[in-house]
Image: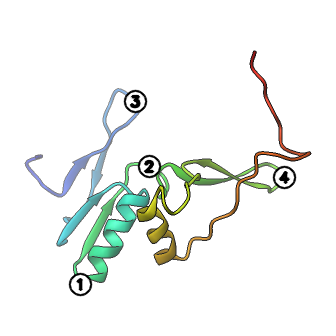
Amino acid sequence: MPADPTRVASRSSSRLARRTIMAPIESDFYVVGAGYAGMTAAHRLHRAGNSVTVLEAGPRIGGRTWTATMSDGTLFEIGGQWVADAEAQPDVRRLMDEFGIEAYGQWDRGNTTPMIRIR
């Protein structure tokens, strides 16, 4: 730990590390990572009356679940967007229900579905 706990070294692509001044954050719990698991943990801890601080190294929350936008404005999913049926992943389905996340069907047959055959 640095001599002054309010000074935290930040990662930098340059050879010289930049320094950031940061006030101490008092919290009952610290959650590392703002992906689906981290945000679920933070939500449940907060709902139980605890103060929670979520620490995320990246520039956005969501972890491996990410909706990206193409240049024409079309939205598409990158990463962990596929969820199996409720019998295979009951915990994930319960979280989806709890947070009001809607599931969409998956199609693997049809005129517009690309098929790749490897021989």
Observer-side mark, 4 or 3, equals 4
Q: Earlier in the sequence, mark 4 or mark 3?
A: 3
Q: Which residue is mark 4?
A: 72
Q: Which residue is mark 1?
A: 49
Q: Residue at x 46, y 52 (%)?
A: 63
Residue type at numbered disc 3? Ser
Quarter of the image for residue 48 reads bottom left
Residue type at numbered disc 1? Gly
Image position of 91 (left or right of 85): left
Q: Earlier in the sequence, mark 2 or mark 4?
A: 2
Count neighbours of disc 3 (C-alpha within 10 A) and say few if under 14, some if 14 to 19, many if 20 or more.
few
Q: Earlier in the sequence, mark 2 or mark 1?
A: 1
Q: Which residue is mark 3?
A: 14
Q: Residue 75 location, x and y as percent?
A: 74, 56
Q: Which residue is mark 2?
A: 58
Q: Give the tally of numbered discs.
A: 4
Observer-side mark, 3 or 1, equals 1
The answer to whether residue 27 shows anywhere in this view is yes
Q: CA distance from mark 2 to mark 4?
A: 25 Å
